[in-house]
Image (tube, helix red, strand yellow):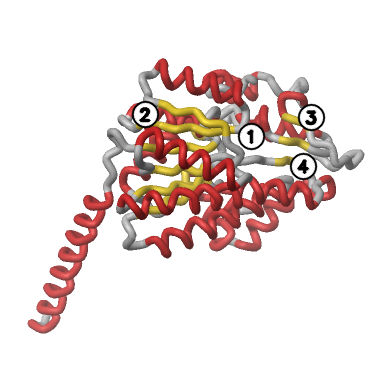
Amino acid sequence: MSVPMRVRLGVALAAGLAGGLLAARRVRRRRLDLHDAVALVTGGSRGLGLELARELGRRGARVAICARDADTLARARQDLEQRGVPVLALECDVTDRESVASTVRAVREQWGRLDVLVNNAGIIQVGPLETMTLDDFEQAMRVNFWGPLHMTLAALPAMRGQGGGRIVNVVSIGGKISVPHLGPYSASKFALAGLSEGLRAELAGSGIEVTTVYPGLMRTGSPRHALFKGQHRAEFAWFSISAALPLLTMSVQRAARRIANAVERGEASIVLSLPARLAARAPALVPRTTAAVLALVNHLLPGAGVASAAQRRGRDSESGWSPSVLTRLGDRAARTQNQRG
């Protein structure tokens, strides 16, 4: 090997090591100590939101949770208090800017700052496209896109004033690959993904880190509160079974730990579970195959039946298939994640 080649390799190696050390130092500077940090979790009264509140509290954070239903919120507050978590429970509709502004103001009045905002509140409608209306798409956008935007705009002045913070947007694998019978949901989650990733770029250097979270299927018990159309019992059956299968889904506790780690590190984005990571890459790697598989899935899903604009909750759509042994893990999660109301 010639001397010039050795020199070039040495310079390249030194540059790589220097770059790695600088990157490591930046990571250390970005790391957030959650002890005594103040976190606000939307949709924090049940499911992933409640488990995130528990996990953040376990790491020493003071946690504000907000949701629309007062009874569910009261049970969640009691749950957190029994675990020793300093908690503030606030009724809030994330689609209402005044309600959002009041919530952020209440958190700052209680604890003087806001270090972490977790935009977790969401809605999901399940059914064939022909059963969906413009109102369904608008409802999904109001909750899943405008809600996080309202919260983010309300929280940014406080975070800028204190020199930094964390914003976490819980999107979905449905924000990377659009699954049949989830049209309004996927459309709104794609919009949130674009907002979240753009925010991270725009806020770079401000001390405010934005993390985009793409969960796959999780065992949260949430199908009970999803909205179903068309053959609602059949739709609820496939949806709730899919959300409970052990190899396809992730426990909500594991998901919450992974998200809390991402908050501390200021990670740009995370995709939760191996099946979700594979699904996220499929459209770019094998687009035609992905389209064919999704078309087959759509063919296998329930038809519209007698198309109706009526929405029914999952808890009102039970059948012999769900609840059953196939949904046992999801039913267990519903009990532990305050989903039974």
Q: Is residue 2 above or below residue 79?
A: below
The amino acid type found where label 1 is placed reads Ser
The quarter holding residue 4 reads: bottom left
* Residue 341 rendering spot, x and y as whole percentages: 64, 20
Check contact, mark 4 vs mark 2: CB within 8 A: no
Indicate the secondary structure of the residue bearing disc 1. Answer: helix
Between marks 2 and 1 in the image, the one whose residue lies nearer the viewer: 2
Front residue of 191 and 175: 191
**Label 3 sits on residue:** 233
Q: What residue is drawn where x is 23% and y is 57%? A: 26
Q: Earlier in the sequence, mark 3 or mark 1?
A: 3
Horizontal side of residue 136 vs 56, given as left or right:
right
From the viewer's perspective, is residue 14 above or below residue 187? below
Which residue does the image show at 37% across and 29% down from the upper left?
57
Could you say whether the residue bearing mark 3 is in a helix, strand or loop?
helix
**Of the residues shown, which amino acid type is indicated by label 4?**
Gly
Q: Is residue 37 left or right of residue 183?
A: left
Give me the C-alpha separation between circle 3 and circle 4: 11 Å
- Residue occupied by mark 1: 242
Work out whether mark 2 precedes mark 1 in sequence or the reverse, and give the earlier one.
2
**Mark 4 or mark 1: whose residue is earlier in sequence:** 4
